[in-house]
Image (cartoon, coloured by chain):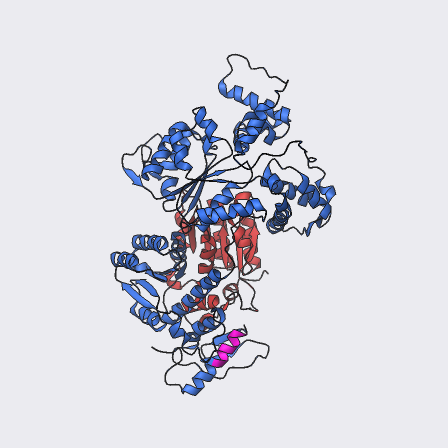
Chain colours: A blue, B red
Amino acid sequence: MRSCAAPERPEGERVAAMREVGRLALHRRRVNIARERRCVRPGPRGRPAVEGRVEGTGGRAIVPFLHHCRFSSRRALHPEASMGAVARFGEGRACLLAAGAPDLAEALARAGFAPTVARDERQALAALDRTSPSAVYVAQALGAASVKMLVAASAQRCADAPVVVLGASGTVQEAVDAMQLGATDYLAPPHDPDAIVGRLAMTLARARRREEGAPRALPGIVGTSPAMVKLYGAIEKVSRYKSNVLLLGESGTGKEIIARALHECGPRRGHLFVPVNCATLGREMLENELFGHERGAFTGANERKRGLFELADGGTFFLDEIADMDVSTQAKLLRVLERNEFRRVGGTAKVKVDLSIIAATNRSLEEGIATGRFREDLYYRLKVVTLVVPPLRERREDVPLLVDAFVADFNRRTGGRIQGVEPAALRRLAELDWPGNVRELRNAMEGACVLAAGDVVSAADLEHLRPPRRSSSPRPAPSLRAAEGERAARSAPPSRATIEIPIGCTLEEAERRVVLAALRHHRTRARAARALGIGLRTLYTKLAAWGPGADAETA
Amino acid sequence: MPKRHDPAAARGPGPSKSSGSGAIGGLARFVLLGPEVTSAAPPPSVLLLARPGLESDELFADLAAREDLCLVRVATAAAATRMLEEMPVALVIACPETPAAAVDAVLAGVARASPGTPVLAIRTRQAPEPAGWNRHRVAVLRMPLLAGVLSRSIDVVLGMGPVPKSTRRGR
């Protein structure tokens, strides 16, 4: 083993220098490393100088030691006792080098790792099966296909280990390609072994700090209400496995954010999360997007196109508004779920994929089964685990937190200077029912921020919002509320308003007239969608398809 | 006369090229700029060519929250070209909705004002890549992007420092 300082230096001087460096590091002082002068000296503004020189390996050899002192959880370690910390921070952990340079293996061994050197892709894959490395280095010299395979295999088999690509050409495209494959880092040539070990020290120390810190926050989810805490617990449990999940909840409750959180916290987090809204595409288009097509499968198919299922291989597929998927497409989806395979449109070869499916809907799938619009076998396949996302009216205590988050987001996106919301305005926001849930609150807050007279949103800025709707009967318990609105709309006394549809009118035109009449009658899109028995997003999709004229007709 | 681009300044707080090889310069920038280490040098400027919109806002939300980057967002190629002439830029990013012609215009601006500045062009899955981009220091990122890929790509590209003369032609 070799210390970071050159062996020819007197031991006393070396210890003194390292002690001073450790002291500075522990006090979080900035330390500049001047390579030419081969000394370690502190930052500006008259901080005490470090006289001890670090020779032989150059000043940057001190970097792993600095990081050991700065980032190690064992801060109590005395700098003097940490002499040779560089040699120990590897703690005997395994490390894989796929076609790496021998001097890098030596440097890693000096740092306390147990490096395994693989000459080719086959050996590297075998090593990944045998051991669980703490870091993986893949040399670009192995070829693009091997690098892709090894980065993917590393992400699957040792998700927490940093995967570093050792570049060959050093071009920007090569670096970016490595990142897109899922690598943690890319090092352009020439590869300095000591520098690489220093960088690994930093990466591992940061990862350890993350592990030791507070429990991982769920990305994008805001709320501390009992309903949300219960949901967090469920997400925590469900995300450990690769099971399919069915998300139920009203429109605007944040089902996609929950799906993303499940993906980010789960074992597939190193792979793609691919969301698709089943209501926005017609049957043929949706199948083409999901499964891809072969060249010549239909007019205009000039080249083979990989589908989104193929693209998401290894990751998570989110199917939003699953209730709106065509029955024939449901059969094909069922095959993907059961056999993990499918055929491209116009193709004969089977394509194997490994996916987790998260499906979401704001409608009752049981009713869909009863009316023959949803396959029962698919329902049970999707419903391995069911999570219900609570509507905003059942977690009013989260409104202040959400409002803060939306104001901060508004400021960040638009460069706004809104400081916050007046207490009276906050009370008013908490009183509203928010049938459009978090999405409606978000848009309302953005409108209020735009219209705010000063840098604080006041109650006057919220006057355009609807008054609170007081219902005499309490809300039902949180079960499948997706169908609640639909049922309520259906059980409500029918309106006297009528529309006339002439015989000979096409089905599409009839649908258009019914939807526009519902919009005119119910005033808001959310209510109209509920009365029509369709999702809000479906309604938006239909209106977008009919063009701006449709909106004008409802005015 | 607008201030010309200074690649050394645009590279950010890393050591100068004379203090070591290019790779080490890039490395030291990361090693010394951990979250607990302060630096007097300003963060590198990243010029973002993206029209306002929900999709691009979501795509660049992570970047906007980063304090170690100075993100300058412009909506048009003309504005991007002007910014390139007026301030040192370490990296240019073009969003997926940017037409290839607009990227070409920005590349011309880069060649004029700050040659060697890397350009990240984010393109949709099937969008063609004009052959002329090979001559510039353009890297293409394809949608959809894995979480964190854009941020990591920026870190890596900024850490690579100036383009070596031998690799300026082609990728």
Q: What's the residue at 33%, 37% (across, down)?
A: A338
Q: Is residue A341 magenta?
A: no
Q: Which residues are magenta?
A: A19-27
Left or right of A435, for residue A74 = left
Left or right of A401, for residue A533 = left
Q: What's the residue at 50%, 13% (across, down)?
A: A504
Q: Nearer the viewer, residue A527 or A279?
A: A527
Q: Nearer the viewer, residue A12 or A435?
A: A435
Which x, y percent locates residue A333? 37, 34
Is residue A423 visible to the viewer in this orientation of the structure?
yes
Please tell me in which quadrant of the rendered image residue A3 appears: bottom left
Prevailing SS of the magenta stretch: helix
Left or right of B44, for residue A459 = right
Q: Nearer the viewer, residue A479 or A297?
A: A479
Query: Which image quarter is the C terminus of chain A in?
Result: top right
Q: Nearer the viewer, residue A143 or A302?
A: A143
Is residue B22 visible to the viewer in this orientation of the structure?
no
Callout count: 0
Which x, y percent locates residue A535? 53, 31
